Amino acid sequence: MSIDTTAINRRMSHFDRHDEVWLFGYGSLIYKVDFPYIERRPAYIRHWVRRLWQGSHDHRGTPQAPGRVVTLIPQAGASCVGMAYLIEPRTFAQLDEREKNGYLRFATALHFGEERTAEGLVYIATEENAAYLGPAPEADIARHIAASSGPSGPNRDYLLQLADALRGLDADDPHVFDIERHLVELIGHERGGH
C-alpha cells in the first residue's frame, strides 16, 4: 500500500514567509510542467544521484502493480542536473498532490552554473517510505518498466521522456541511459526486431 505524504508536506513551514520559492525538478518535473511558474532555468544540486528506485502506485503503475520512477539517493561528490522553477508558495498545494506517493519536501541549495546559488526545495522519496522499491540491476528495472502502466500512461513513456529531457539539458546520467538502452532493446524484441 502506498503512503500519502500530502499532510506531512503541508506542515512544512520553512518557506512560509517567502513570496517566491525555487523548486528543483529531476524527474517528470523536468518535462511535464502542469503547474504555474514565474521563471524556469537549468540547475543542479550536489551530493545526490537520480535512481529509478521509487514505486509509482498512482501515476505510472497501480497499487497492485507499481511502476518505477526516480528519486534521489545521497552520494558524496555527485551532482544531479535538473530544472529549477521559481514558483509561488500556493503552488505547493498542487505539487504536494502530484508528489504524494512517498515524496517529502526537503530544503536544498540549487546551483545555477558556477557562480549563483539559491536555497530551494526538492521532493525526495527516501527509502523509509512504503512505496520504495530499492535497487535492482538496470536490465531488471527496464523489464519492470516495460510491463508497467498507470493512470498517467505507460511507465516506458516516463523513462523515454526523462532520458530525452536529460539529453536536452546535456546531463550525463548513466543509470537512466543504461535502463533506457535495455528498454529500447525490449521494445525492439516486442515489435519483432532482432
Image: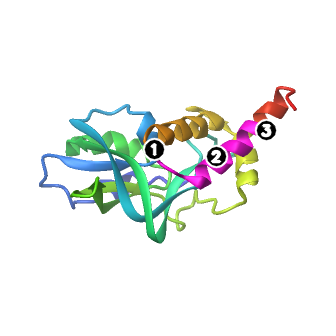
Q: Position of residue 64 (x, y in %)?
A: 69, 46
What residue does disc 3 label?
186
| Quarter of the figure with the N terminus | bottom right
State the count of labels: 3
* Segment colored magenta: 171-185
**Residue 59 seen by the camera:** no
Q: Of tags 2 and 1, which is closer to the observer?
A: 1
What amino acid is at disc 1? Asp
Q: Position of residue 41 (x, y in %)?
A: 29, 41
| Quarter of the figure with the C terminus | top right
Q: Of tags 1 and 3, which is closer to the observer?
A: 1
**Circle 3: element type:** helix
Q: Is residue 28 above or below residue 6?
A: above
Question: Toward the viewer: 73 or 61?
Answer: 73
**Mark before the other along the chain sequence, 1 or 3:** 1
Colour pattern of the rendering: rainbow
**Residue 84 seen by the camera:** yes
Residue 170 numbered tag:
1
Quarter assignment of residue 76: bottom left
Between the C-alphas of marks 1 and 3, the distance is: 25 Å
The overriding secondary structure of the stretch rendered in magenta is: helix
* Labelled pair 2, 1 in contact (Cβ < 8 Å): no
Residue 178 on the magenta span: yes
What residue does disc 2 label?
63
Between the C-alphas of marks 3 and 2, the distance is: 24 Å
What amino acid is at disc 2? Pro
16 vs 64, left or right, is left
**Mark before the other along the chain sequence, 3 or 2:** 2
**Mark before the other along the chain sequence, 2 or 1:** 2
What amino acid is at disc 3? Leu
